[in-house]
């Protein structure tokens, strides 16, 4: 039942956002896309084997940007949630995130801007240990990640920009029941938060490789000056959309994360499927 409410929550987001897209302030531009991806396989007396399964993902990608003279303020909200159900097994979560990025810039010279950025990431639903699928290891706002820092922005366009922030504060927050027996996401046993100071580099590049095929790249680096600065955190996202018509597309999403506070190795995720898209 809880999963059903989360799906309804996404639909309600689209309804509310559609009502607020009109903005009489000419300096603002807004654009959003709601996507529903579905994959399904079924078998009946199939001698080669196979299990009936269904997977679904919903997502919202919303940009609202401000330009006025020498000032730029870019904002992006990403919300995603996915489930998969294999016959004979419990429903499992395949995607779950809420992310907000804000980047403020004031013209310096050429393509360069003085900048300040803010990033927030968390999740909506409970996360289970991959090995047991019974032990809870995370839930809403646990963990929650905050980054904030001044820097310099190189911005050629809304689709090509790199921000360098050499003095970035990072805060990781978890509920105390996840640190009762040990550390969690880098937060020490018995604590509820972890503060870091380091350098962040954030890049964004979106382009069309051909008509109706767009490629979006989001790359983030972070190094903690206070502990193991050589262990650079990496978060790379690749989104490819191949439009069939106004409402249908084939979507491919890939993400890889390296964060030794959470897992000593690369975490990878990929999703591909037929998408129903709705722009708002």
Image (spheres, rainbow, N blue to C red):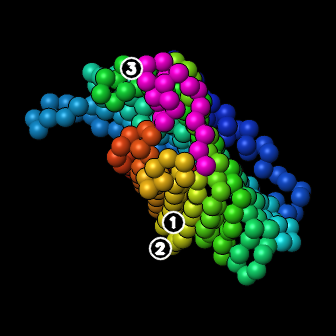
Q: Earlier in the sequence, mark 1 or mark 3?
A: 3
Q: Earlier in the sequence, mark 3 or mark 2?
A: 3
In front of the other: 75 or 219? 219
Write down the residue under mark 1. Answer: 214
Q: Check the image and name the residue furthest to the right.
A: 24
Stretch of the chain drawn in magenta: 178-197
Write down the residue under mark 2. Answer: 209
Q: Which mark is residue 135?
A: 3
Q: Are marks 3 and 2 in contact (CB under 8 Å)?
A: no
Is residue 100 shown to the viewer in this render?
A: yes
Q: Secondary structure at mark 1?
A: strand
State the separation of the CA atoms marked 3 and 2.
43 Å
Q: Main secondary structure of the magenta part?
A: loop
Give residue 35's position: percent from left, percent from top: 55, 47
Q: Are marks 1 and 3 in contact (CB under 8 Å)?
A: no
Give residue 100's position: percent from left, percent from top: 65, 46
């Amino acid at each position: 039942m809880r999963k059903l409410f989360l799906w309804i929550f996404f639909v309600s987001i689209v309804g509310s956002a559609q009502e607020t897209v009109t903005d009489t302030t000419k300096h603002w531009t807004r654009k959003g896309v709601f996507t529903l991806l579905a994959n399904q396989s079924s078998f009946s007396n199939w001698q080669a084997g196979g299990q009936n399964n269904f997977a679904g993902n919903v997502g919202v990608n919303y940009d609202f940007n401000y330009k006025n003279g020498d000032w730029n303020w870019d904002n992006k909200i990403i919300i995603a949630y996915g489930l998969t159900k294999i016959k004979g097994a419990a429903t499992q979560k395949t995607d779950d995130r809420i992310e907000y990025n804000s980047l403020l810039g004031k013209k310096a010279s050429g393509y360069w801007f003085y900048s300040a950025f803010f990033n927030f990431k968390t999740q909506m639903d409970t996360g289970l240990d991959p090995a047991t699928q019974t032990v809870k290891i995370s839930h809403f706002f646990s963990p929650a990640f905050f980054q904030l820092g001044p820097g310099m922005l190189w911005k050629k366009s809304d689709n090509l920009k790199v921000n360098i922030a050499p003095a970035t504060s990072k805060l990781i927050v978890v509920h105390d029941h996840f640190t009762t027996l040990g550390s969690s996401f880098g937060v020490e046993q018995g604590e509820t938060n972890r503060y870091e100071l380091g350098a962040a580099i954030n890049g964004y590049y979106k382009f069309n490789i051909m008509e109706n095929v767009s490629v979006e790249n989001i790359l983030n680096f972070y190094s903690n000056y206070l502990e193991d600065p050589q262990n650079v955190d990496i978060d790379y996202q690749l989104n490819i959309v191949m439009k069939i018509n106004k409402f249908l597309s084939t979507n491919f999403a890939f993400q890889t994360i390296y964060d030794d506070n959470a897992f000593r190795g690369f975490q990878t995720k990929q999703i591909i499927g037929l998408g129903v898209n709705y722009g708002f």
